[in-house]
Amino acid sequence: MDTAVYPFGNTHWPDRDADEMRTVNRRTREAWTRSLRILACDVSSATEVLAKALALRRDGVHFALDLNFEDPRERAVRERSAELCATYATWDEVRLMLDDYTATIAEQHPTVSATDRVAIFEAMRLADSIVVRSWAEHARLCAAIGDLPRMVDVVMGNKPVLSRMAGRQTDVVVYAPQFRADELAPFITALGDFQLPVTIVASDAPTIACGIRFELPHRANAALARARVIVDASGNDPGVAPALASMGRPLAVSTTGGAAELMRGAMTFKVWNRRSILAAVANALGAAPPMFRAVRRDDPPRERAPIAFGALAPLVSVIVATYNRPDLLRVSLATIERQTYPQLEIIVVNDGGSDIAKVIAQFPRARLINGERNRGPAAARNRGLAAAEGTFVTFFDDDDEMFPDHLATLVNALQQTNLDVAYGQLINVIVPSAMLRHQTSAIAGQTALLDHADIQWAGSLAPTAVLFRRELVDRIGGLDESLETAEDYDFWLRLVDGRECARVDDVTSAYCIRTDGSNYSSHDGARRYLRAHQAIYAKHPSARSLVAAGRASMLEFFAG
C-alpha cells in the first residue's frame, strides 16, 4: 500500500541548542517511519484516502491520518482575488469587488461537500489517530465534519530557513512566498493606503497597479531585515510563524493558522477580511515581539498499543448462521480465524443449506452444526447459543468481515468496564454482487450509538459489532423464533433493557451490502418488516409519547 509519510516538523525554539534539536528531530523521524504509517489527506483526495484506509485496516495495519484542512474561505478568496486581478486594472476596483464577495463568502463556499465530509469522517474512524497542524485546524475539522471520532495529535510542519539580517526597521513585510501576488489581493487592498512602506514576499509580481513593493522568495531575508512588522500570510501551517518570530519583530498571524496557539502577543487577522488585516497590522505597530507560550517538543502521532491477552483470556464464541452461501462464508471465516484474540471458538450453524463440511475443514477453530431444514436466522442463532461454551458471545453474519483486532478490542472493553455488553463501530462496504465482493463501489459509515429512547422504535445494534456475556441469555432468553424478520432488533431491546453498554469508538468490522439484492435481509419485504415491528412494539409497550411518535413514524415508513 502506497502511503505518504508525514515529514516530522523541524520545530525548534530560540533557546534550544541547534545540535540538540537536530538530534531530537532525527530520532523522532526515525521512530515515526518505523512504528506507524501515515496517510496524508486533504479534501480533494478524501475518497481515495478512504479506500486506502479501508485496505490498510483489512490487512491489520494501523495508521495515523494526516489531515491538511485549509479554511475553505481562504482558498476561495485567493481564487477570487486572482480572477479579479485578471479582470480589473487597479487595486481600488479589486477592493470594491472583493469587499462585495467576502461579505457573503461563508454562504457562497460551504466548508466541505456532503460526499467529502462522509469520506473524511470514515477515514478518521478507521485511523488510530488524527494529525493536524494546529488546534485551529482541529476546530475547522469539527465545524465541517462534526465531533471528531479519534484522538488528535498536533504536529507542525517544517520551518523555513531564514537568516536574521541587520537593517533599518521601516517596512510592513507580508510573508507569503508560496502564493502568487494576484492571490494576495486582501493584503494588497488592506495595506494599499498604509502610510509606511509595505513589502510583500510572493512568488511573482501582481498584474494590478499598486504602490506596494514586491520581492521574490530568494529576497525574503533582505525584505525581513527591513521589517518593522511582519505579517505571516503563508497559509495554515503554524510552523512558519516561529521562524518569523525569531526575527524579534511584532508579528501578525492568521486566526486559522494556529500560530497564536504557540505565542503570546501576536496580532491576529482573518485572511478573507481586509479590515481585520489592516487592524492587525495597526495593532502590531505598537506591540512587542511575540513570546512563546512554552518550550515544547511535538510528539509524534500516537499508535494504539496492541491489546495483549494471556493464556487465561476468557473464551469467545462466534456464532455464524449460514444458508447456501459457501463462498461468502469462506471469506468471512477467514477474517474470524485471523483474529489477534487468542481464545475463540467459531460455531457455524448450517440452517438446512447445502453441504459446507469442506469449507469448515479449512478453519481449525470452527465447528459445524447442521440443521435438517431451513428455520431462519433466529432458530439458527439459538442453536449456536445452546452450543456456545464461551464467556462472551457474538453473532456474525456469513458475508461480513472482522478486522484482525475486532474481538480483542471488544473483549478489552468488557473487561475494562465490567459491563455485560460492548459494541463497536462498523463500516458499510457496498459491492455490486457476491461474485464481485472486493470490487467496492461505495463505502458508507454506520455510527453506532445506543440511545435508550430511540432504540425503542429504531436504531438496533448491528449483530456484527456487538459482544455480550453468555450468562445474559439465561436471564433474557434467546432470539424470538416466531418473528419472521427483525429478530435481532427484538433481542437487542431485551439485551440492553436496564443496562448500559460499553461503546468502542474503533471501526473494527465491515458490513457487506450487495446492490444485486442478494443480501440475506434483502429477501424480506417491507410488509414482513411491518408485521415484525408491530409484533415487537406489542411485546415491548411504552407509555412515552416520544416513543409512540417514533414507532408510528417507523410503521408509516414500512407501510409506505
Image (tube, helix red, strand yellow):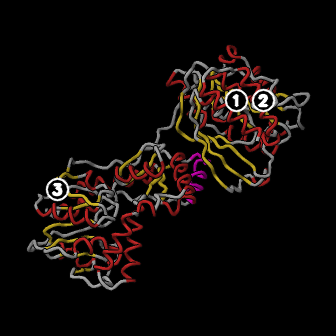
Residue 313, image x and y in percent?
A: 58, 24
Say if 68 sits above or below 539 in the image: below
Residue closer to the observer: 88 or 204:
88
Residue 49, image x and y in percent?
A: 55, 57
Residue closer to the observer: 515 or 399:
515
User: Is the C-beta separation of discs 3 and 2 under 8 Å?
Assistant: no
* Crowd band around label 3 with a 10 angstrom C-alpha radius: few (<14), some (14–19), many (20+): many
Residue 309, image x and y in percent?
A: 54, 29
Between circles 2 and 1, the one closer to the viewer is 2
Q: Residue at x 25, y 53 (%)?
A: 260
Between circles 1 and 3, the one closer to the viewer is 1
Check disc 2 and report the residue beneath it. Answer: 532
Please identify the quarter of the rendering in which residue 266 is found.
bottom left
Check disc 3 and report the residue beneath it. Answer: 290
User: Is the C-beta separation of discs 2 and 1 under 8 Å?
Assistant: yes
Check disc 1 and report the residue beneath it. Answer: 489
Q: Which residue is drawn at 13% across and 74% down?
A: 196
* Residue located farthest toward the left when viewing the structure as drawn: 168
- Label 1 element class: helix
Using the numbered discs, state the Cα–Cα distance from disc 1 to disc 3 in whole angstroms: 59 Å
Residue closer to the observer: 486 or 422:
486
Magenta range is 48-60
Residue 351, image x and y in percent?
A: 85, 31
> Which dot marks residue 7?
none
Does the magenta stretch mainly form a helix, a strand or a loop? helix
Using the numbered discs, state the Cα–Cα distance from disc 3 to disc 2 in whole angstroms: 67 Å
Q: Which of marks 2 and 1 is nearer the N terminus?
A: 1
**Image quadrant for the C terminus?**
top right
